[in-house]
Amino acid sequence: MLEKRREKRMYKDKIDDEIIRILKEDSRESFVDIGKKLKLSESAVRRRVKNLIDGQIIKKFTVEIGEQNSTKAIVLISVESSMDTSKVSTKLTKLEGIKTVYEITGQYDIAVILSAPNITEINGSIDQLRKVPGVSDTNTVIILREVV
C-alpha cells in the first residue's frame, strides 16, 4: 500500500522574520547569540533556521567582500529581440568583473554591476560584455561614490 506523504508547508512568523533580519546583517551570527537576542534556546534557533532553509525561504548564505579601492560601474544592456534574454544574462554572469546581473523592464533588458581595481579593467570588462552574442546596445555609468 502506498503511503501518501504530506507536503510540509513553511509558515513564517515574526520570530523567523527577526532571525532573517539578524542573519542578513551578519550571516556569521551564532545561533547562541541569536537566541539570546530573541530569548530562545540555541536549539530553537537552529531548528527555525533549518526549517527556513528546508522551506527555501533562506536560499543561501553569502559573503560580501569589501572593495574600498575598486571602481564600480552600472551597465544597462539592450538584447536583440531574436535572442532569449535569460541566455544572455547567464553568459554575462560568467564574465570577469561582473558582480550582479539583473533582468529589468523598460528601455533596457539587463542591468549589470561591474567592479574592478581600476577604470582600465572596467573598460576591459565592458569590451568583453559587448562581445556576448545578443548584446545590441549598452549604456555605462561609473559609480562615483556609494552613499550608505
Image: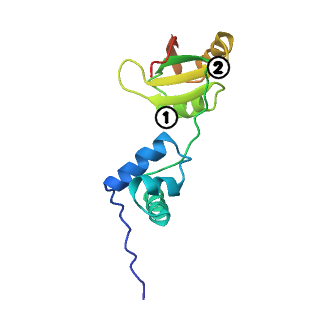
Q: Is residue 84 visible?
A: no
**Disc 2 secondary structure class:** strand
Between 146 and 97, the one lying in front of the other is: 146
Between 77 and 120, the one lying in front of the other is: 120
Image location (x, y in percent) of residue 26:
52, 42
Q: What residue type is disc 2 on?
A: Ala
Residue at image coords 51%, 24%: 112
Residue at image coords 35%, 21%: 106
Image location (x, y in percent) of residue 94:
63, 32
Cα–Cα gap, marks 1 and 2: 24 Å
Residue beneath disc 1? 86
Q: Residue furthest bottom?
A: 1
Quadrant, the C terminus:
top left
Image location (x, y in percent) of residue 115:
60, 21
Residue beneath disc 2? 116
Mark 2: few, some, or many residues within 10 Å (few <14, many ≥20)? many
As drawn, is 123 to the left or to the right of 110? right
Residue at image coords 60%, 23%: 132
Image location (x, y in percent) of residue 57:
42, 52
**Disc 1 secondary structure class:** helix
Q: Is residue 102 visible?
A: yes
Q: Which mark is residue 139?
A: none
Residue at image coords 58%, 24%: 133
Work out whether 70 lies above or below 101.
Answer: above
